[in-house]
Image (spheres, grey):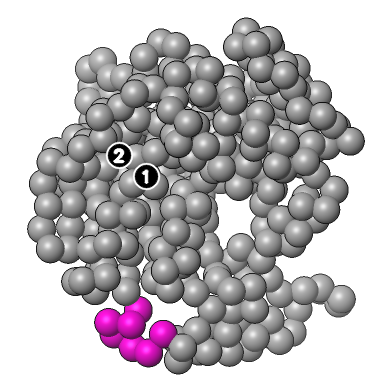
Amino acid sequence: MNVCANDLEIFSREIFKRAGLSEEHAQTQANILVWANLRGIDSHGVLRIPRYLGWLQKGIMNSVPNISITKQTPSSVLIDADKAPGALSMSFAMEQSIEKAQKAGIGWAFVKHTTHSGPVGYYAQLAVREEMVGIVIVTSRPNMAYFGSKAAGVATNPIAIAVPGGPDGSVMLDMASSELAIGKIKDALAREAVLPEGGALTKEGRPTTDPAEAAIPMPLGGAKGSGLSLMFETLVSLLIGNPLLEPALAGREQDHSQNGLAIAVNISTFTDIDDYKKCMTALAQALKELPPMKSGGEIFLPGEIEIRKLEERRRVGIPIPTRIWNQLSASAKTLNVPMPETT
């Protein structure tokens, strides 16, 4: 069944308001989830609502957080999120980075004690709107196999890099350091789809293509993915004195905490912004004119497929698998929120 994006956003906002978030915070959370669904990133869309509600109820997520700046310099800031929903703390972090970059040329915002941040590309795009480069990294507890091991040793830490220019107005790479994000496994389960070979292990460490059994994603590109995830931990978590991997591996109890990094680079500090965008557009065009591997094939830029999905879903609505619809219905009934209309 399909749901109009606007209706899904209103529904999501009401859900989070009833769960204790302020009107502004509920709107931010709803915006980000529907932003993901519109672009086909369903693993980070409204599928997450039941899990988020559970965390809010248990206090893993703080519905009324005191997001505060604890340290800052002319170009950097350290933010304590107070277990805020990641949508709130990472949006705030990028806003702070943009403000710093307007004066210093670059803004570098660390976040600690945050929770699941959703699609990190959303925050990178906030910088692009200000004609800046946006870079976002999020770190978490061990949930991905370390290369050579059949157990979780690092996290599916994502990175997004977005720049202005190109045929669609921006070019963005948004990826996890794993073959499959945890949300992709949940999405495959909801759609009753089979996982690709080599994407995940069971909790016992056996390879599987069954999303119902998949518990440990494999690193992207083997040693490259696990190495990238490890270095993100050193660049973010260790640098702000809030390690996530080693305490968990050593058996020391942790809550569902994440750390984040939001970077904004003011392009006009270093070169003319119009020249930058023209160069990006020319480069994009040159890449798309390369000969395709297969006859009749097409060369895609990072983020281009998501833009096409956005255009499609704006027209026909956002598809919600029956399994997810039923879960949302259960949550909505508990909070006395009417379900959105379907087409």
Name the residue: 50% across, 54% down.
121
What is the three-letter code of the residue carrying label 1? Answer: Met
* Along the line of sight, the residue nearer the viewer: 126 or 156: 126
State which tag comes first along the sequence, 2 or 1: 1
What is the three-letter code of the residue carrying label 2? Answer: Asn
Name the residue: 11% across, 46% down.
71
Q: In the shown orientation, is residue 132 left or right of residue 234?
A: right
The image quadrant where one finds the C terminus is top right
Q: Residues within 10 Å of mark 2 (few under 14, many from 20)?
A: many
Whether residues under marks 2 and 1 lie with C-beta atoms below 8 angstroms apart, the answer is: no
Q: Which mark is residue 90?
A: 1
Which residue is denoted by mark 2 in the rendering? 259
The image quadrant where one finds the N terminus is top right
Where is residue 323? Give x, y as percent: 76, 21
Determine if residue 289 is in view.
Answer: yes
Where is residue 219? Give x, y as percent: 48, 44
Question: Under tag 1, what secondary structure?
Answer: helix
Q: Which residues are magenta?
A: 267-273
Q: What is the C-alpha distance between the residues marked 2 and 1? A: 10 Å
